[in-house]
Amino acid sequence: MSSSPIEWKCVADKPAVMGRYMGLEVPGSLTQAMYVWIDGSGEGLRAKTKTLDTEPKCAEDCPVWNFDGSSTGQAEGCDSDIFLYPVSMFRDPFRGGRNKLVLCETYTHDKKPSESNRRKSCKVVMDKAKDDKPWFGIEQEYTLLGLDKHPFGWPKNGFPGPQGPYYCAVGADKILGRGVVEAHYRACLYAGVKISGTNAEVMPAQWEFQVGPCEGIAMGDQLWMARFLLHRVAEDFNLVVSFDPKPIPGDWNGAGAHCNFSTKKMREKGGIDVINAAIKKLSTTHQRHIQVYDPHQGKDNERRLTGLHETSTILEFSAGVANRNASVRIPRTVAEDGFGYLEDRRPSSNCDPYSVTEMLVRTTVLNE
């Protein structure tokens, strides 16, 4: 017997019913802290909630917790405890008030980072490069799906019209899912995520939001929380978020997570020379970067980086001014001003931002 998607929502999920309970007064200074972490897949997010006696002022005020790692692909059943170490805290836009969202690193019982904990090594690299003040901005593309995993709003037995009218469009015949986008944007602003913009993408039901500029380790923290918020908002619309880099085969754009990167010297007068030197370093380490720019060591990007649909080919490195078919793009304004940043267009939409930002700094700043 084949499984089918759950098509119903229980009555308690209706806003009018939930409102009765969410409006109840919470005694004293009790706080609900939702701990959020990356699971063993390196892509999925998990969460559970703990009651705290007082409102925490920072992540360090939240106690270390644990969970069953055998149920998240992070441990065996015979030794299943994985520990949650709070590292970054945000306001909770769903519960409101003094309640928090707490991003955590995952560790084994012997205090070693779990395999999917890429933040630990990224933090070491960012600390080494702190004097260079590495800044990042990531353009996160994603696709909205129905519970049947079909692109939201697409004909059930066919395809929408060809690409062209949908990018940054307006109108019910071109835009699919704007409600999710607007709710997510506001949730990010409330939470304290440094979201800097959003737009409809080239493929219908595909969108993008941008986070940044963020310095060092904050880029990964902010983007992972923004992804969590997007999944959680989509729940309320009975929709699913896909970060698949090529959700629909054929003549449709894929989805990336273009990473804008600069150092202090790049942002200063004459920084274009530093940018060009960084690009030269990136040209000699192309395959190393491809290996970490998606969670499956390049296999996801093989479907996306074809040289078509505004991508470079995965097989070779390229760079150019205002060239969206290149591995690395120098924005036109940067070339004219002589300073600024570069855009690495290779990371896939399901990349781990900790791995991407770490590799950029290792290659261009630390020369590792």
Image: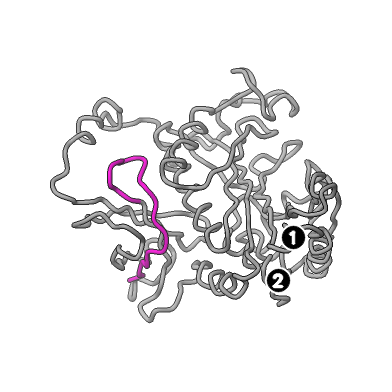
- Is residue 82 covered in magenta? yes
> Quick one: SS at disc 1?
loop
Vertically, is 150 above or below 111? Answer: above
Q: On the rendered structure, is 100 left or right of 338?
A: left
Q: Position of residue 237 (x, y in %)?
A: 43, 31
- Is residue 164 covered in magenta? no
Instruction: Name the residue: 58% across, 33% down.
Output: 151
**Which of the two marks, 2 or 1, is nearer to us in this view?**
1
Considering every residue shown, the one lying at the far front of the view is 269
Q: Residues within 10 Å of mark 1 (few under 14, many from 20)?
A: many
Q: Residue at label 2?
A: 365
Vertically, is 116 above or below 144? Answer: below
Which three-letter amino acid code belongs to the residue tagged 1? Met
Measure how far apart labels 2 and 1 are at the Cα level.
Answer: 11 Å
> Quick one: SS at disc 2?
loop
Q: Is residue 356 visible?
A: no
Specify the quadrant of the image occupied by residue 206.
Answer: top right
Range covered by the magenta-colored residues: 81-100
